Image (cartoon, rainbow, N blue to C red):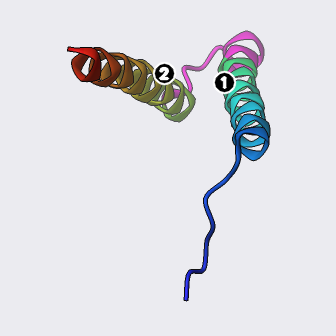
Amino acid sequence: MRLFRKMDEMELSINFKALRLAWLFGIIFLLVWVWMDWIIGRTFNSLGVILLVSQLIVYWAGQAFFKWQLGKDEE
């Protein structure tokens, strides 16, 4: 018995848009958090910066990997 079924194009599009919105919210939240700590307290929030930078690195690495993978399939 299968627990999950394959999503159709409309469900994939909806899930992609929701994921993109959640990622954007996370990035904006982390930027505001680090910025407010710097402006108000003049402290460097290392946890916020680490989370922000690691999220961006994973995004860029994933994007590069999937572009490479698609290019490899066309050959």
Residue on which the image places disc 1: 27
Specify the quadrant that holds the N terminus. Answer: bottom right
Q: Nearer the viewer, residue 53 or 71?
A: 71
Three-letter amino acid code at the position of disc 1: Ile
First in residue order: circle 1 vs circle 2: 1
Residue 19 relative to residue 60: left or right: right
Say which quarter of the image contains residue 43.
top right
What number is the disc on residue 56?
A: 2
The residues colored magenta run 35-46
Residue 21 relative to residue 38: left or right: right
Give the percent coordinates (x, y) of residue 52.
Answer: 54, 25
Instruction: Write the residue at 70% across / 14% down.
Output: 35
Instruction: Write the residue at 70% across / 48% down.
Output: 8
Residue found farthest to the front: 75
Mark 1 element type: helix
Mark 2 element type: helix
Marks 1/2 in contact by CB < 8 Å: the verdict is yes
Magenta stretch mostly in which secondary structure? helix
Label 1: how many Cα within 10 Å (few below 14, some 14–19, many 20+): some
Instruction: Write the residue at 29% across / 24% down.
Output: 69
Separation (CA) of disc 1 from disc 2? 8 Å
Say which quarter of the image contains residue 6.
bottom right
Instruction: Determine if the magenta segment contains residue 29.
Output: no
